[in-house]
């Protein structure tokens, strides 16, 4: 007896089995498009599975664009994101609470370049002072979001992608110069 495989269904430019980015949750896969009746109105919903978080999200198909749901980045944008990591950390001289809000907003924007900027700005070399707990949390959240999207685009494991990202961060000439400058006792951009 042959089993039928369900054909991908498409709505609003998205289709089932496709990986997408939901701004506040990162990369998920559309597993189904279902109809539900809510308050007497029929709604068509994308069912998005976030495997790592063991979470399922239902998004009305007609609201997907408004909430910022998007397709995965293409290879060129992934390259641009990885190149962003090579730049010098840009840390504003504002209070940590304001910077933390800005970092959080960038992470939740779902924009790969903004997320890469947060990873770059919060990464610490071994020779630099230890991060605070909240800095570490934001760094790990940004690294996780970036890694998941690069994994989905490049079809690599998360371990491989994190190794690539960390290698770029550690071996960037601009970062090496900034670290050398701080070791010499001069001011550094990461201070």
Image (spheres, helix red, strand yellow):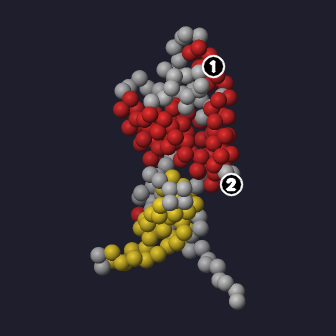
Q: In the image, is residue 130 above or below residue 113?
A: above
Q: Quick one: SS at disc 2?
A: loop
Q: Quick one: SS at disc 1?
A: helix
Label 2 neighbour load within 10 Å: few <14, some 14-19, many 20+: few
Residue shown at 36% from the left, 27% from the top? 95
Residue shown at 52% from the left, 40% from the top? 140
Is residue 21 visible to us here?
no
Q: Nearer the viewer, residue 121 or 87?
A: 121
Question: Please, which residue is most extreme toward the bottom here?
Answer: 1
Residue shown at 43% from the left, 77% from the top? 35
- Provide the residue designation for mark 1: 177
Numbered badge on residue 100: none
Q: In the image, is residue 10 above or below residue 154?
A: below
Q: Quadrant of the N terminus?
A: bottom right
**Residue 39: quadrant of the picture:** bottom left
**Residue 184: quadrant of the picture:** top right
Residue 166, x across and y down, in percent? 63, 36
Question: Please, which residue is most extreme toward the top here?
Answer: 185
Query: What is the spatial separation of the Cα atoms under label 2 and label 1, in whole angstroms?
Result: 33 Å
Label 1 neighbour load within 10 Å: few <14, some 14-19, many 20+: few
- Provide the residue designation for mark 2: 155
Q: Earlier in the sequence, mark 2 or mark 1?
A: 2
As drawn, is 169 to the left or to the right of 90?
right
Residue shown at 53% from the left, 17% from the top? 188
Is residue 34 visible to us here?
yes
Residue 10, x across and y down, in percent? 55, 71
């Amino acid at each position: 007896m042959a089993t039928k495989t369900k054909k991908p269904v498409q709505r609003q430019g998205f289709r089932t089995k496709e990986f997408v980015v939901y701004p506040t949750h990162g990369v998920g896969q559309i597993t189904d498009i279902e109809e539900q009746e809510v308050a007497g109105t029929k709604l068509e919903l994308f069912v998005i599975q976030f495997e790592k978080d063991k979470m399922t999200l239902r998004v009305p198909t007609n609201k997907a664009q408004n909430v910022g749901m998007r397709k995965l980045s293409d290879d060129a944008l992934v390259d641009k994101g990885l190149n962003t990591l090579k730049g010098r950390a840009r840390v504003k001289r504002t209070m940590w609470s304001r910077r933390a809000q800005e970092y959080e907003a960038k992470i939740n924007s779902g924009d790969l370049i903004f997320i890469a900027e947060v990873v770059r700005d919060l990464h610490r070399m071994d020779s630099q002072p230890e991060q605070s707990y909240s800095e570490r949390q934001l760094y790990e959240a940004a690294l996780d979001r970036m890694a998941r999207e690069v994994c989905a685009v490049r079809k690599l494991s998360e371990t491989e992608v994190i190794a690539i990202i960390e290698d770029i961060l550690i071996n960037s000439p601009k970062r090496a110069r900034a670290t050398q400058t701080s070791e010499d006792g001069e001011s550094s951009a990461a201070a």
